[in-house]
Image (cartoon, rainbow, N blue to C red):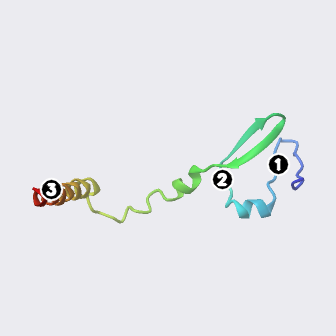
Amino acid sequence: MGQMATVSSKGQVVIPASLRKKYGLKAGSKVSINDQNGHFTVTPNPFDALLALRGSLSHIKEDMEGWWVEEKRREREREDAKFAECL
């Protein structure tokens, strides 16, 4: 059996500190609560980690789309050269 918690008069439940630390839950973290066959499941929002990365690459000023197009062009040239060698 898991850890026990008490529901407050406002319907709030405190997630034990050990679980908050284990799953990286901080004030404002979102969780999903589901009812499955009479059991509640609380699942950390998997997108929180992704959202935390938002803006972390903003220091890169390079045109990523232009870089990608140029890289694909070079790759195509290398493949064409390999094909030409086989003929």
Q: Secondary structure at mark 1?
A: loop
Which comes before the other along the chain, label 2 or label 1? 1
| Residue that label 1 marks | 13
Q: Earlier in the sequence, mark 3 or mark 2?
A: 2
Instruction: Residue type at mark 3: give it.
Output: Phe
Q: CA distance from mark 2 to mark 1?
A: 14 Å
Relative to 31, 59 lies left or right: left
Q: Residues within 10 Å of mark 1 (few under 14, many from 20)?
A: few
Q: Residue 23 versus residue 25: which sits nearer the camera?
A: 23
In the displayed structure, does residue 20 sit left or right of residue 28?
A: right
Residue that badge 2 annotates: 28
For badge 2, the amino acid type reads Gly
Res. 80 image quadrant: bottom left
* Mark sitting on residue 83: 3
**Alpha-carbon distance for marks 3 and 2?**
56 Å
Left or right position of 31 against 61? right
Residue drawn at the location 68% of the way across and 58% of the way down: 25
Q: Dot 2 surroundings within 10 Å: few (below 14), some, or many (20 or more)?
A: few
Callouts 2 and 1 close, C-beta under 8 Å: no
Please provide percent x and percent y for residue 46.
Answer: 60, 50
Q: Residue at x 52, y 53 (%)?
A: 51
Q: Mark 1 or mark 3: which comes first in sequence?
A: 1
Q: Which residue is nearer to you in this view: 75 or 13?
A: 75
Residue at the location (74% across, 38% down)? 34
Q: CA distance from mark 1 to mark 3?
A: 65 Å
For the residues labelled 1 and 3, say whether their Cβ atoms are less than 8 Å apart.
no
Q: Quick one: 6 or 80, which is closer to the camera? A: 80
Residue kind at label 1, given as amino acid type: Val
Q: Position of residue 70 (x, y in %)?
A: 19, 57
Horizontal and vertical percent for residue 10?
83, 41
Where in the figure is residue 21, as x and y percent of width and height? 72, 64
